[in-house]
Structures are given as C-alpha cells and as structure tokens.
Image (tube, helix red, strand yellow):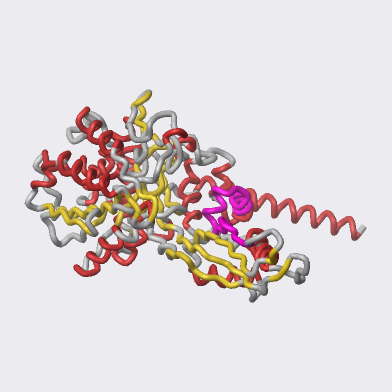
Amino acid sequence: MKITNVIKLILKSSALLLTLLVSVIIIRTITFPDKQPQFEKCKVSDSDFIPLTNERLERFRTAIRIPSICTAVDNCNYTAILQMHDLIKESFPLIHSSKFIQRLVFVNYSLLYIVEGTDQTLLPYLLVSHLDVVPAKSEDWEVDPFAATIKDGVIYGRGTLDVKNTLFGMLEALEFRLARGDRPTRTVYMAFGHDEEVTGVRGAVAIGDYFSSQGITFDYISDEGLVVTNGVVPGMQTPVGLIGIAEKGMAVLEFSVTVTPGHASMPAKETSIGILAKAMVALEQNAHENFFGRGPEKYTFEHLATRMTLPYRIIMANLWLFGPLISRQLASKPNTNSIIRTTTALTMFNAGVKWNVISSTATAIVSHRVHPLQSIDDVLEVDKKIIQDDRVKVKILSRFDPSPISPIDSDGYRILHQTIDQIFEVPVVPSLFIASSDSKHFVKFSKCIYRFSPSLLTSAEIKGIHGVNERIKIKNYEQTINFFYHLMINSEKLSKTKSVFEKDPKEL
C-alpha cells in the first residue's frame, strides 16, 4: 500500500512538473520579445530612388570584363587593376573633380577615397570593398566568366558578387548624391584594396598604416560579408539579412616528425609517416570546443525567434532548454559546425623519397579557422593536448587572429539594420562571418566592424562566390546601389530613428 502511494505521489509530482515546464515554454514563446524594429521602406516612387539606367548597368558590366585577378601575394594582374583605376575615373567624373573628395593611392594599386563632410564633430565611418577577384576557369562555366553576359535578367561574371557589385554600388551612390548637389554632412572613407583575395597584406595593410599615421578612428566600419539569404534558414518563410559581427581567424600550421632514416627491410617500430599520421587522425577525430550559446550564433537564433514557424519558434525562444539539442544539430553538418567552433582541416601531407627507404621526415599542413572566443595560442595548446606526442613539432606558417565581437547596440549596427530593412524588407540578425575580409586589418580603428554584402541569394547562388557561374540579378544590383545610398543617408541621421534601439544591450 505504501509503495502504491509513493508511486502515485511520484506520478502526480512528475505531471505537475511537466505541466509547469510546458507552461513556461508556452509563456516564454508567446511573450518572447520581437527584436525586429520596422523602418520606412525604400520605394521606386521616392524622389531619391536610384534607377539602374543602361549607363549604370554598362559601367558595372565593363568592370566585370576586366580580369583583375590575384592568385597569390605579389602575383596579381596589375595591368587589369590599373584598368579598374581608369574605369573608375572615367565612370565617376563628379567624384574625381570634387574639391572635398581626396583620392589616395597606396602601393601603386590600392585606393582610398576621403569624402569630407560638412560636420567635423561627427566621427567618420569607413566603407570597404576591393578591386581584385579570384581566378575562373572558363571551361567550367556556362558562359565566359569575364564577358558580363546577361541571361534571363541575371548578370554572369567573376566579381558580380565578390565584390565589384559593392565597389561600383558605393561609387554610383556617391556620384548620385553629388549630381543632386548633396554634400555629405558626415565624413566617409572608402577603402578599395587590390589584393583582398590573397589576404590583403599589401593593400589593406598599407591603408591601415595610413590610418595609424594620421590617428584616424571610425564610428563604424562596413565591409563585405554575409548576405540576405533566401530559403537557407530553416523555419523561415522569408529571406533573412545576416550581419557578420565577428570574423573567424585563421592559423595555417605545419606539423612535422623527424626520425633516423633507414632501409625498408629493417624498419623501426614507428616511422615518421606513422607517427604523424596518428597525430593527424587524432586532430580530425577530436574537435575543438563547441561554443554554442556563447558566440554570435546565439543572437542569430534569438533575433529570429518571433519570425519563425512552429516548432522552430518554440525551440528558439527557449534555448535555455533546447540549447543542447540545437548544439548537437549544428555540430552534425559541416556548414553549421563551422559557426560554433574552431574547425580543423588537414589539407596537405608530404613524406617519402623512395618505395624502399624509410623517410626521415614527414610533414602535414593543417588549416584552422579560429572561433572568436579562442585565440591562436589557445588553438595550439588544444592541438598539443590532443596529439600528446612531443615528437610531433608544430610551426605557424600563417596566422590571422579572429576579430573581436562587435556590439549589436551601436549606431553602426543600427544603421546597417535600418538600411537592410529599408531595401530588402526582411528580418535582420547578427551572425558570425566564417570567411575572411580586409576588415581584419582595420580592427584597431573601430570597435564596431560589420560584415555585410547587400546581395539576396539562394544557397545555389551563394555557391557561385569563388565557384562557377557567379551571378547577380539585375534587380539586386539596383538594390545594391540604393543600399549604399541609404547607408550614407542613414549614417548622417543618427538621432531620428535611434529610439527603437534604446533598450538594454542585453535585450538586443
């Protein structure tokens, strides 16, 4: 009898706890705050709407036809990059004749435009793009990658998305303002490196040195980065604008083992190849720490929660409960696993000189993309703990530290959020940029660095970036021009829409 009563008590208590848990989940889902302020939209009927005329379209297509390719540091098509200089000068005469715009050239090929505003009390901001592109094999494409072919309302070509669209979008927007006699009130810098695709160690670094020498800092910096995705985010029936508030770092490491060489007929218990292979297997099988819930991705899901369909809305509004489930799901796929941790990729392995000789050395190259919550020194320590073999030596071949995480309650983030909503009419969320941009060379000039490219893309179209059949819709290029126009205008109206963001930073 007593046992029966105990069982009944346990069942009643369990039912009560379950009811309470379900109630908390439902209440939190219903009351979860909406983090998507609304702004006045950009309309074609607006007096300051910038239409994509044939002249503007042809200027962009001409830029795409210039093969300004960089394949390695100090190995760029410099003739083509200088052709880009000439095209920019020819295309935008008002910019190049203005008395309040200064054009500077660094290391012969990188450009910096300084547009002096009328109000020197306002901190300037920096817009970043670049002149170079990656190579493209014409035999892999449906069309010539440097012909700027138009098919079904789409422009094909290397650089249409990465990033001659932002380069010419910025310049078209500024030229439009000048044609209207509209001098900016706030100083804006525009930095166009010539070697971003090969890490920007010549162009962006030289521009950064100039900023240092002049003591220049910025209210915010906007560089290429994440996009407006369409059909990519599960649980979303609309496109989503993603702003990169941090950028992963990179560490290229060489692991090596050296032993006494010998004849294959008398092998030692372990060879250099075997020792190193075992170490590399250990690195592949032991992932670095999962940072889900502590990095930018937490903001991504929470800021989308109220716009998601069921059951995603329930899950994202209750990450305190479902976080481990989401974490495991993200870790199960390469494209989402890269958002939550430092990744490890074994990219090269070299050993052996002859089939019957025991090699004295073996080397392997590992590429780490480093999460913002880790340092490169942290990564090295983790690798050593995983390998646990002092015979395996490591050397850093190349490194770029991950960026700091930029705030999401700043004027710069607000301005970008507002502008994306005005142009694309989509929810906007912070996220992590897992690739690399020139902004990594500018981290000491602003605490607010954001990475966003105003491109509306499906997952198939995203694959065109650095891939085959890179392309942009003609309408999207028109949106790009208007995006940068409104970004400039919004950057000069700091007080008019600020109230929608005047909340506790923890809520944003």
Q: How many marks?
A: 0
Residue 23: x percent and y percent?
A: 61, 49
Please tell me whether residue 130 belongs to the stretch shown in magenta.
Answer: no
**Which of the image's four quarters has the N terminus?**
bottom right
Q: Which residues are magenta?
A: 326-352
Residue 495: x percent and y percent?
A: 23, 53
Against 504, residue 26 (above or below) is: above
> What residue occupies the far left of the structure in this picture?
99
Q: Quadrant of residue 167?
A: top left
Please tell me whether residue 338 belongs to the stretch shown in magenta.
Answer: yes
Question: Foreground: 15 or 227?
Answer: 227
Q: Is residue 67 visible?
A: yes
Residue 333: x percent and y percent?
A: 60, 48
Residue at figure coordinates x 33%, y 52% from the top left:
223
> What residue occupies the far right of the structure in this picture?
1
Q: Is residue 69 left or right of residue 371?
A: left
Residue at figure coordinates x 32%, y 32% from the top left:
148
Q: Is residue 495 visible?
A: no
Residue at figure coordinates x 42%, y 34% from the top left:
138
**Which of the image's four quarters has the C terminus?**
bottom left
Q: Is residue 455 left or right of residue 250?
A: left
Q: Is residue 214 left or right of residue 416?
A: left
Question: Foreground: 355 or 71?
Answer: 355
